[in-house]
């Protein structure tokens, strides 16, 4: 599988549901990107910012075209082999910014169709479990395909400290957990592409 993965060169788009610069979920995605560079051959992560997207409004669609910032985002999704979400939990659900991004990319033609995906969440006591459930529910209609295991749910506030003051992940054990998620996403992507 590793030789096939290296040959295939899987491109992953990373999307963080939090717009906050010091977001722990953004920190998880940074750690995932570093892990790929250091120790996962054939898997490359590109972070895509969702803050510039306007709130979804079909009045902004003119003659089947989307605003340039929306179309650029949709092209990034379409060009990716897989998606990695950093999914915080706001009021037991996904953030408005993440839902907005999901909705824009689902407009015709749906950019999410048949994309393998994985979720990393850092939140309070439940670690983002409720938000992940909602994200998976939304994905059903959008034809996104999430890995089921391993799950990654991190209680970001439980000692010892997991992040530094800039939101960078400093816990080596947590990094290893992220690595298992990335390897599972890699294997699942290859399987869906018929290369494993």
Image: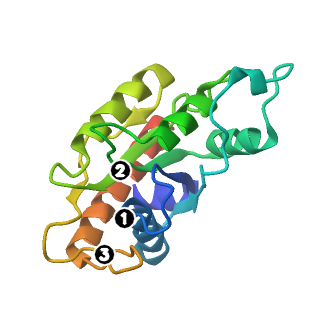
Question: Mark 1 or mark 3: which comes first in sequence?
Answer: 1
- 3D distance between C-alphas at marks 3 and 2: 15 Å
Res 49 seen here: yes
Placement of 164 over or under 35, stated as above or below: below
- 3D distance between C-alphas at marks 1 and 2: 8 Å
Badge 3 element: loop
- The spot of residue 87 in percent (x, y) is 38, 48
Q: Residue furthest front?
A: 91
For mark 1, does the 10 Å Cα neighbourhood hold few (<14), some (14 to 19), or many (20 or more) residues?
many
- Taking the spot 41% from the left edge, 63% from the top edge, the residue there is 23
- The spot of residue 8 in percent (x, y) is 56, 54
- The spot of residue 166 in percent (x, y) is 42, 78
- Taking the spot 37% from the left edge, 34% from the top edge, the residue there is 135
Q: Which residue is mark 1?
A: 24
- 3D distance between C-alphas at marks 1 and 3: 7 Å
Between 10 and 96, the residue placed more toward the observer is 96
Q: Are marks 1 and 2 in contact (CB under 8 Å)?
A: yes
Question: Mark 1 or mark 2: which comes first in sequence?
Answer: 1
Between 187 and 117, the residue placed more toward the observer is 117
Instruction: Place residue 25 in its image quadrant.
Output: bottom left
Residue 65 falls left or right of residue 164: right
Q: Which residue is mark 3?
A: 163
- Taking the spot 65% from the left edge, 39% from the top edge, the residue there is 78
């Amino acid at each position: 599988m590793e030789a096939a993965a290296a040959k295939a060169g899987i491109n992953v788009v990373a999307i963080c549901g939090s717009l906050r610069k010091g977001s722990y979920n953004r920190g998880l995605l940074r750690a995932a990107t570093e892990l790929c560079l250091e120790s996962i051959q054939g898997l490359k992560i590109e972070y895509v910012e969702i803050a510039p997207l306007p709130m979804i409004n079909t009045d902004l669609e003119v003659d089947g075209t989307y605003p340039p910032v929306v179309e650029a985002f949709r092209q990034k999704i379409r060009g990716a082999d897989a998606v990695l979400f950093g999914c915080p939990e706001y009021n037991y659900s996904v953030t408005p910014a993440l839902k907005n991004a999901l909705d824009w990319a689902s407009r015709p033609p749906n950019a999410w169709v048949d994309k393998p995906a994985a979720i990393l969440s850092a939140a309070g006591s439940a670690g983002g479990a409720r938000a992940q459930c909602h994200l998976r529910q939304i994905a059903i209609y959008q034809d996104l395909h999430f890995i089921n295991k391993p799950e990654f749910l991190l209680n970001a506030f439980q000692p010892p400290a997991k992040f530094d003051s800039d939101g960078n992940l400093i816990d080596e054990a947590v990094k290893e957990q992220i690595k298992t998620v990335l390897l599972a996403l890699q294997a699942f992507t290859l399987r869906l592409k018929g290369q494993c």
